[in-house]
Every structure is written in C-alpha cells, then in structure tokens.
Amino acid sequence: MARIALLLLLTPFGLHAQVSFERLLNADDEPHNWLTYSGTYASTRYSLLDRITPANVGELELKWVFQAQSLEKFESTPLVVDGIMYLTEAPNTAVALDAARGRVFWDYRHNPSNLSRPCCGRVNRGLAMLGDTLFMATIDAQLVAIDAVNGQPVWRTAVADPGAGYAMTLAPLVVKDKVIVGVAGGEFGIRGFVSAYDAETGEEAWKFYTIPGPGEPGHETWEGDTDAWQHGGASVWLTGSYDPDLDQTYWGIGNPGPDWNPAQRPGDNLYSDAVVALDPDTGELQWYFQFTPNDDYDYDAVQIPVLADIGLETFSSGRQMLWANRNGFFYVLDRTNGEFVRGEPFTEVNWASGLSESGRPIETPQPPGETTYPGVQGATNWYSPSYSPRTGLFYVPAWENYGSVFWPEEQEYQEGLRFLGGIPGTPIPGGPNVPSLRGDRINNWTEAVGTGAVIALDPVTGEHRWKYEMTDVTTSGILTTATDLLFTGGREGYFHALDAVTGDLLWRTNLGGDIANGPISYAVDGRQYVAVAAGNGLFVFGLRD
Amino acid sequence: MRRLLFGVLASLFAGGQLMAQAHVGQYEQADIAYGSTLYATYCVVCHGESGDLFPGVNLRSGVFRHAASDRDLRGILLDGIPGTTMVAGAYEDAELVALIAYLRNMDTEIGGVALGDATSGQALFAGKGDCGSCHRVAGQGPRFAPDLSDIGAIRSASVLSRALEDPHGSTLPMNRAVRVVTAEGTVINGRRLNEDTYSVQLIAEDERLLSLDKRDLREYTILTAWDLPSYDDVFSEEEVTDLLAYLRSLKGMN
C-alpha cells in the first residue's frame, strides 16, 4: 500500500503536494512534513515525531547524503512535503529531491546579478511553499516563484535594487495568499522593509518600512534634521512567525547603520533592533518592542520570534514570545501587545547592567579600547532556538566568553558601498575578529576567543536548567522532539543528540564540516529521519530498518 | 633553555604586517589613497585592517596564492576565488586600479620597522640565538616548535619585533603548550595543533602527532603563558634588526 502511495506521489498524473494555507495553519497535524522554515508558524522547531527516542537514538545511521555543487555556505533549511524535499544551495539554486533516497527530481538555477553586494557571503536559508509553488528570495533582491512539480520559474519580482546594497538571504513566509519577505543590507546603508507579494502574480501587496518616514510615528527617534533615517539600515534577513488567532506576523529587525557609530544617528533609531508585529493583510504595524535602542554594537534583533504559551497568565495574556537576543539578554514578551514580561542576561553582558521595568537596557558603555561583551557576532544570532512544550524549556545556541573592542568612526554614506562607521576588533592579538566568517577547521585559540554552548532556559523563572558546552562557537540551530531529544550541531562538525531534559549527550557523529543550519525531522512511509547540513552536504539519518 | 627558546619563537606566530617593496614607485599616490578607502569599505570585514585577519592569508606579504600579476589580482577582485569565501565584486576600472595600488603598497602605507642585515641575522639565528635548536627552517631543525620557513610571509616586521621584545606578552593562544596525563599516568608535553569538544590534536616533544580523546585523560592542562625574559637581554638593538631582516626574508617555498 505504501508503495502504491509512493508511486502516485511520483507520477506527474498523481496527486502531487498542494500546500494550502489551511495545511500551513495546521502543520502540527502532519509532523511527517516540514512545511515552513521554522517547521510551524509558532517557530518552535519542535517535532511531534516519536519513532526516534533516547533509547534508540544510539542506533541512528546515515541514510543518504546530498552533496551541494556549490561550495558556498550551506545555511538552507529544507522543506519536506509528502516525501519530497525542497532545498536551496548557495547562491540561489532550488532543488527538489526524494526525501527517502536523496535522488534529485529537478533543480532550478537563478543566476544572481553581479551587482549584488552581500555583506557576508551569498547565503540562502531556504524556500516557502503555497499550493504547488515554491518561493525563493535571492541574493540580488528578487523574489522568484518556482513550479514545485517541474522546477520552472512562474514569476519573478524585483523587490529592491541590488546595486544599492539590497539583498535577500531569508526563506520567505507565506501567510494566507501572500508571500512575505524582508531585505538584507544593513551594512550598506539601505532603508529596510518587510514586504508582501501576491502568491499568484508576484504583485506587491504592501510594504512596511522598518524606518518610519517623515510624519510617521517613530520618525522622531531619528533625531535632528539629517538624512540618517534614509540610510539607517534596519534590515530584515530572517523569517518571521505568525499567530493566526491574533492575526499578527512577527519579524525581527536588524541593526541601525552605520553599524558602529551611533553618534551619526542620534535617537532610539526605531525600528532597528526591534521586533515588529504586522497585520499580514495590510502590513500595518500592530506593536513593536525595541531590544537595543541607538545600538553601538551591531546587535541585530534578527532571531526567530518563538511563539509559546508558557503559562505566565499572572503577568500577561498567556500568549508569550520567547527571544534570546544577540545583545545577550533573554526576553519574554506578551505577544498580544509587545509588553515586556521579563528578561535577564543569558551569557556574559557588560554593555548594560540590566533591563528596566519596561525592558529598556540600563546601558553601561565600556571605555574606549575595553572589551564589550557580547562581541559583535552576539551572544546568539540567527541560528534557530527551539522550545519544547513537553519540557517547558527554551534552548538557545549561545556564544560565551566572547567579546569585541569597538572603534566608532565617522563615515559618509555612498550608495552601494559599505556603511559601517568603524570596525570592531578582537581583544586577543592575532585572534579571529569575526569568528563566524572564518570557518577555519583548526581551532587552537579557542579558550581565549570564545566558546559555544546550548543553554536550556526555563522561560517561567529565567533559570538556566542545564548547559552543554562546546569548545568552538556554534552556528547551528536546534531541534527538539516529542521524545525529549534535542539535535544540534556546531562549528566543529559534530552532530549531537542530547537529552532535552538533562542535557546529557546520547549520540554524536562527526560530519566533518561546519553545521550552519538548523536540523529538521520528517518521515516518509512511517520512517522518521533527521536531516542536517554540514560543510557542503546535507546528511540524513534514520534508524536501522 | 630549549623550552625557553621555543617559547620565544612560538610567540613570533602573531598577526602581522610586512615590507613588500617590490612594487613601490609603480603606483600613483592618489590611487593608493583611494584604494585604502575602497579597502576599508569592501575588504576590511574579512581581511582586517592589517590584511591578515583571514587565516592563512596576509595581503601585506606581497605574496598572493592565486595571483602573481596585477592582471591576476584584477581577475580575483572581479570574479572572486571559486570554492573559497572570496566573493566576486562589481568594481569599476578606476576602483580596480586603486585597490591594486593599495594592495601592492599596503605594508609601507601602514608602517614598517627598521630592518638590518639578513645575512648577519642568519648567523645570529644559528649562532648566538641558538634558534635552530628548536625551530626548523627550510627542512633543517626539529619540528616541535613552529616551523619558521615562511614566517616572513605570514608575520610582519612589527609583530616579529614585538615578539622578540616581549615574548611573554606576545605568545598567542594558537601556540599554547599543553600538558597531558594519560589514564596510565604517562605525561605528555606538546604544542596544541587543534582542539574540539571531545578531542585534542598535538605535536609531542618527541615529534609524534597525537590525537587524544579527552575522556581518556587524567589531566589536560593548557599552559597560557611562558615564563620568558625579553630577547632584548640577549641581542643588541642592531642585532635585533639583523635578526628581523633574516626572519622577514623567510618566505617559504613560494
């Protein structure tokens, strides 16, 4: 029977996957699929699959490997829909493959314009799907719709001008009949935005500027009569979340520009380093919460908004948003209105001594030449955290003992050129300045420069329940499952399975390359798989047959 | 003594700058100046202000692994280097000219250190300094301490100078020594080559390459500093400039 179903799936005349909005809303009802970048609209990266357990995880074996033809960074999270996997390889090639065997059905190559000026590599984090159409946001700021059956382009829309420093690296988010994206370019003096496109036609439906223009509320946070707001960055380079009951979509906003010279942009610089809640039909702002006003350090609030109901009714509506920020603080927000519920540092922080009652940082800038913690890459970054409703814990990929020295500099804006306002340095002579860009296979400066960890936080109390330490920093996301397993990788190329309750190591394997995406789990014909990219390959594990 | 000298020269493996003189005079000062602003915009995040931030690459060395001529450099700037993180850039002609001018003169632009006579320096290296009793150059000498055959291509004169002056303060984490006691009680002293969460790779004093599982070790200590005097006490000022000139002349097999 399973065999017949598979044949139907693979024949062009059979029932191929149609991903309706209804299915996206109820993604938890089909845990064998991975329908959006973060798995579900709540973005918890919690899988309900339960075949792989702490008792049998030690028997995991490699089922297949997909070797990317691209040697650029593999940051893509695959989608899996009814036995077919859709992923991207850098810069902008979409690939459809058999999720049980790894054999390729088709690939579609978008050749980005050489005008594109990505800050940090031509990465792509994955696709979105609606109906039988896939959506890919490209490094040259195009949004491309691709037929999921034959891999042919359906429409292409120019979202922004790559020559002016705009780029896209995120996986789009589909809400109802619209495809929502945001633009990268916070190091090039762009004016960031989130925008939505009609999934059928590619026509722009709305655009929300992450820096309010003259006359709009928040514009006054770009003080003085300057054009700083026009080049103030506030990019959007990671997929948002969606709460269907509140009908709000949430997006984390990047750093203000120039990155390291706040004197050039006095004021709080809304909505940089904030989370915004938008109406998915109109793009209208519902609320915002700013984590780092007038940022000195490039502390993008580009993390996944994790929607979890953790039972803090006493303090708020009971609908929370959990957020471990690049700035080193862990926040619980009320996602109905953006009110601050609680927050505390989760790693070493010295740029602020704490948070006020409203959640505003009490800033303690370090003297010139002194080390600021966390460093420029942050206490965490875009690597997806996970929330398990079973353990009630929030799991964060964290960098510890990692600092930078910041040297602000006046810089004039020029279109298409980097707009940084200085450069952070390492306090360690000869140490790596921006470790995440190095990808070195040799790590012999480790304890001086920074280390990695998975930190399990109790969001109700803020307590650290356990910590799993790694010698190198980590750029891997985290997956938890209904059997209390936690999967994560790291820069060293190890792929680990931990006990989500205790943090004990249950299984590991060496994949030999940086893990810079988030593991996912899916099932085909009742067999559960765990997939993770390392180096330039995607590795898929399952239990022995 | 052996240990002392190892520490001194281990500290030479520090970040750096350099004296690439070969092309000076060939480029317009205005281009060099414009190039430095372009460098600060496009290149600095990965390559750093001193041009040596990216591992294994020192733009101030005057030696480029993928380019000999300016024409080659132009190709790399435009097309990137496939299979690496060096990306393509959409530069205009004037920008290319300026960037190349700056790269060719980067070291002198950023500042140099007085260099003496390399031949005298070589004699000091082998004689008074006894450097060769620990360090290997061009296939001669032991391998426990860092091989200095290409030290002049990967470290600047100022960094080498600082290391001779203050070896203790200049010792980098990447040259740290480790002390290991195995489950059987065997003590191994080594120089750490690599480390991860579960294992450590090292070169032992007897030149064996060892990879050890941390779980199996009774003791694993990373020695963060060496107790060393300044080489100022060993060499005269002039001798230091000679030694620096010799070290700077060591460019590896390229």
Image (spheres, coloured by chain):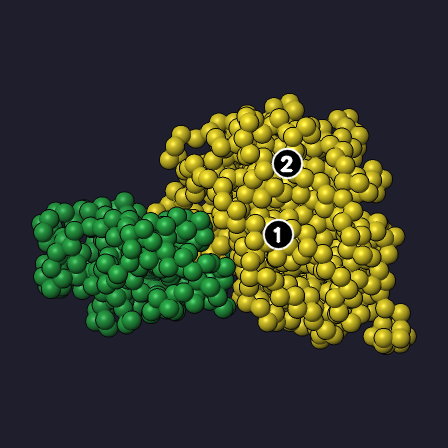
Chain colours: A yellow, B green
* Quadrant, the N terminus of chain A: bottom right
Q: Are marks 1 and 2 in contact (CB under 8 Å)?
A: no
| Residue type at numbered disc 2 | Ile
Residue A148 occupies quadrant: bottom right
State which quadrant residue A407 falls in.
top left
- The amino acid type found where label 1 is placed reads Asp
Q: How would you rate the neighbour count of disc 2 (Cα within 10 Å): few for under 14, some for 14-19, many for 20 or more?
A: many
Tag 2 secondary structure: loop
**Chain of the residue under the numbered disc 1 shown in the image:** A
Q: Which residue is mark 2?
A: A211
Which residue in the protein does label 1 denote?
Answer: A161
Pointer 2 indicates a residue of which chain? A
Is A315 or A362 nearer to us in this picture? A362
Whether callout 1 and callout 2 share a subunit is answered: yes
| Nearest the eye: A299 or A533 | A299
The residue sitting at 72% across, 53% down in the picture is A172
Q: Residue at x 41, y 51 (%)?
A: B38
Residue B231 image point, x, y percent: 16, 49
Q: Residue at x 61, y 41 (%)?
A: A191
- Up the image or down, A452 lies above or below A216; here it is below
